[in-house]
Amino acid sequence: MTLPTPRPAIVIREVGLRDGLQSIARVLPTAQKIEWLQQAYDCGLREIEVGSFVPARLLPQLADTAELVAFAKTLPGLRVSVLVPNLQGARAALASGADLLLVPMSASAAHSRVNVRKEPDAMVNELARICAARDASGSRALVEGGVGTAFGCTLQGHVAPAEVLRLLQAALDAGADRVSLADTVGYADPAAVQALFTQARQIAGERLWCGHFHDTRGLALANVYAALQAGITRFDASLAGIGGCPHAPGASGNVATEDLAYMLASMGLPTGINLPRLLALRARVAAWLDGETLHGSLWRAGLPTTLLAANAPAELTAAA
């Protein structure tokens, strides 16, 4: 198996400020989140999911999402993403000026009921309403249908690939500009990833643009590689590997941004991310989250000293 040629640049969408913090009871001050945003931007990240428009009583950790969007919009060239579980959240996101609205869908009916309190097909209808509201507002924001539990579910168990693909097609038919697949609970393996993403690309083409992998069982980086084989060039990741779904038992740990950025850079796949700066940001965030469970390997091992400077990509050699 070979990687797609010519090799495209790979985009990492940082989701720690949303997917990461929603799974941690501690509420970070808005000033620290703004510092996180600024430093992530300074590292070279150009797509960041800054929060979610949900009621503050449900997720107080994300209650300042509108403020974060406002700050993020001051950073030139940054695509600002937010999660919106319903039309009300989408309207708030559109008013904020967010560039991309991620609508969470689940191929597991059991997970969909507890996560968004709707059946999967009801979420398709909600996505259609969100797209209509976006169009009526004149906004140029993209709407992404994120199909979660695509490889199985801790509540339901097996999730049929045919159901994942059916829901993917339904999201496109409902007006989604983009779609993505998520291994919400870390059940995926590289063979399953390559097979499902290959089938999904036959349906969605370039509109299938992102893979979201949890490292619950240590396979997230291998699964990213398998998705690369299938032609995917955009991946969600979370600084220090934090994250999970509050309504999916055992859904711990996204792929760590720093580990993913290092793997891609060492493979010669450019991401535009300055790794020394990213590791410095990780240390900063780790101090804010002292006592919380963090993940990842690069921060512990450090960058290799054996790389030949003449051949090392800029991501590995740039000074902090």
Image: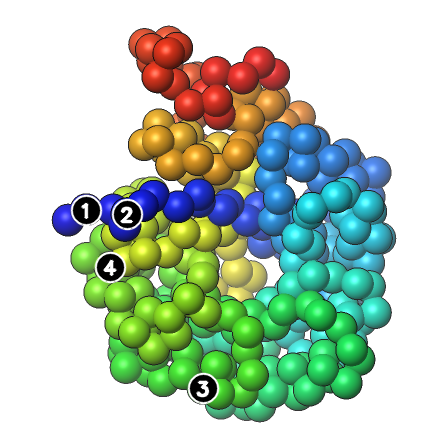
Q: Identify the residue under disc 2.
A: 5
Residue 288: give x, y in percent of width and height. Answer: 70, 31
For the residue carrying disc 2, how many other residues have a C-alpha within 10 Å: few (<14), some (14-19), or many (20+)?
A: few
Residue at image location 72% in from the left, 74% down from the top: 90
Please tell me the numbered disc located at residue 230: none
Q: Nearer the viewer, residue 237 or 135?
A: 135
Residue at image location 48% in from the left, 37% down from the top: 271
Residue at image location 72% in from the left, 82% down from the top: 135
Q: Which dot, 1 or 2, sits closer to the camera?
A: 2
Residue 154: give x, y in percent of width and height. Answer: 37, 67
Label 4 vs label 1: CA separation?
12 Å
Quarter residue 181 falls in: bottom left
Label 4 vs label 2: CA separation?
17 Å
Q: Are marks 4 and 1 in contact (CB under 8 Å)?
A: no
Q: Amino acid at mark 4?
A: Gln
Q: Are marks 1 and 2 in contact (CB under 8 Å)?
A: yes
Residue at image location 82% in from the left, 46% down from the top: 74
Tell me which numbered mark, 4 or 3, is placed earlier along the sequence. Answer: 3
Tell me which numbered mark, 2 or 3, is placed earlier along the sequence. Answer: 2
Q: Identify the residue under disc 3.
A: 170
For the residue carrying disc 1, how many other residues have a C-alpha within 10 Å: few (<14), some (14-19), or many (20+)?
A: few
Tell me which numbered mark, 1 or 3, is placed earlier along the sequence. Answer: 1
